[in-house]
Amino acid sequence: MARTRPAAAQEPKYWHLKTVLNDALETDFAVGEVLPNERELAARFGVARATLRQALDQLELEGRLQRRRGVGTTVAGPRVGVPVARQHHGWPGSAHDSWRTTDCAEEPAPPAVATMLAVPANETVYTLRRLRMMGEQTVGTEELYIPRRTVPGISGFLAAGGRARVVLRELQGLRLQGEPRSVELGVAGAEDARQLDRLPGSPVLVVTTRYVSEERVAAVAISTYRADTCRLTFDGSGEVEVTPYDTRQAS
Amino acid sequence: MARTRPAAAQEPKYWHLKTVLNDALETDFAVGEVLPNERELAARFGVARATLRQALDQLELEGRLQRRRGVGTTVAGPRVGVPVARQHHGWPGSAHDSWRTTDCAEEPAPPAVATMLAVPANETVYTLRRLRMMGEQTVGTEELYIPRRTVPGISGFLAAGGRARVVLRELQGLRLQGEPRSVELGVAGAEDARQLDRLPGSPVLVVTTRYVSEERVAAVAISTYRADTCRLTFDGSGEVEVTPYDTRQAS
DNA sequence: TAGTGGTCTAGACCACATA
DNA sequence: ATGTGGTCTAGACCACTAA
């Protein structure tokens, strides 16, 4: 019976390391403070750098850390509550919906979107690209797809400058029956990553919204939010001051 | 000017590898089929196993693959749409809400939950642990916290057997004003991972629901869903046959 | 230019499932 | 007993940021 521990210490090194770091973050560091660099941390804990990085990866996934190449690793604040659905429905572009349109084009929709819109795969649709801002930060990107049949009033309207506004204004006049959504995990593509100030491959929350009017899908929005810094909120009360998720894995 | 490519091929190996594998999955493999093992794949593509694993990690994050230790890597089907919010509100435990209660206890709530419920940190609350089933699969776990003030009718009721049912039945009689939710990314703890048949550290979607009645938070639910296999749906129409998220990073 | 995180390698051993 | 994915090491070099 002089062998390894019989039933304890079954957990991986990086897992234990993560809990140690997590505790340290709460007690010894303030939000925004920079941690020692990875080589030093690895040496301090007596592990390879790759192992240390596994722990940091998870902490970053949980939104506890923020790593920036060339700069360092800093302690992240609590996640931002981003209102996604309000109490009452609303078309995109209504009031101040905190989206900023960056581009408007007329192009064929991706296959999955074309299916949802029930338009032929090669038909062009109005495609608006928008950014979601929270203060200074860009927290999300969106592609909004609107088939021509939804806004027949602007056929032939080609003034490139104000087209986005025109399309959005046209929507406000329609009756909105509902906006079913879905949320899933994705990874940032090259474009999204650049706009969100993250590396490609970063985890994002992908929200798919189908705007229903006249018993049909009148528009589809694909929104991607930074998963590390955002907490999506539904049904009003977007500003909750308490952190709703308690990391509760025991040691 | 006889140096490396001037502006191309700036992307990491694992990223390119990922797109290659992604294409291969669509053309050469059927859902459920097992891939060659990691050592062989790495050799075939001429990269280190760690690099190959980086690509597989991302594909798994996107729900395209499923890896099981000792078994192999298989091609995953489309994500399951899991209805989280219906058209009309409802207390947990109403009708057949596809949750299965596994445990019922009376214990102090975690600090964050106690704050949301506005109860003292040391006060015990009814704590129901439940599992969300989709067919055979367990796709989510939940802890439902109900302070004693919400269900005063059962104070002193201690029959351990049917307590969960009693608490849930008591809720149905109350008026439900709203159920604001939030969704964020988390990682599975040891317990959750075991019940979800995943490894600790796997990504999960964490849904926090606050059931509001009489202008107060009457109950709080913390639900965690497998992020690899689940797509959370809101506002009816949970069964959409089309994949709403198109992986669209260009090569 | 120095220092940071990001990528990559070529190994080794471990935990787990299956036959 | 074999084969799988999971963990870990000790390096190396690259891309980026800031002084």
Image (spheres, coloured by chain):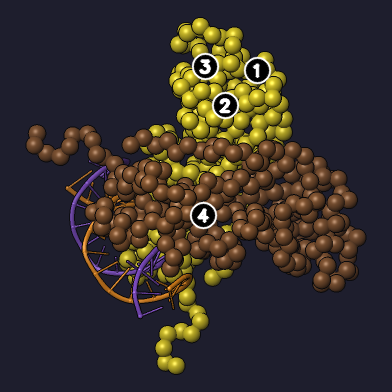
Chain colours: A brown, B yellow, C purple, D orange
| Amino acid marked by disc 1 | Gln
Residue A125: % across, % down = 77, 63
In the picture of the structure, the residue carrying the numbered disc 1 is B172
Residue A121: % across, % down = 72, 62
**Mark 1, mark 2: which one is toward the viewer?**
2
Q: Quadrant of the C terminus of chain B?
A: bottom right
Q: Chain of mark 3?
A: B
Q: Are marks 4 and 1 in contact (CB under 8 Å)?
A: no
Q: Quick check: B205 left or right of A122?
A: left
User: Of helix, strand and loop, which one carries label 3?
Assistant: helix
Same chain for the residues under marks 3 and 2 in the image:
yes
| Amino acid marked by disc 2 | Leu
Same chain for the residues under marks 4 and 3 in the image:
no
Q: Quick check: B211 left or right of B186?
A: right
| Amino acid marked by disc 3 | Ala
Q: Are marks 1 and 3 in contact (CB under 8 Å)?
A: no
Q: Are marks 2 and 4 in contact (CB under 8 Å)?
A: no
In the picture of the structure, the residue carrying the numbered disc 2 is B117
| Mark with earlier residue (1, 3) | 3
Residue at screen point 69% across, 21% down: B214
Residue at screen point 22% across, 34% down: A7
In the picture of the structure, the residue carrying the numbered disc 3 is B164
Q: Chain of mark 1?
A: B
**Mark 3, mark 2: which one is toward the viewer?**
2
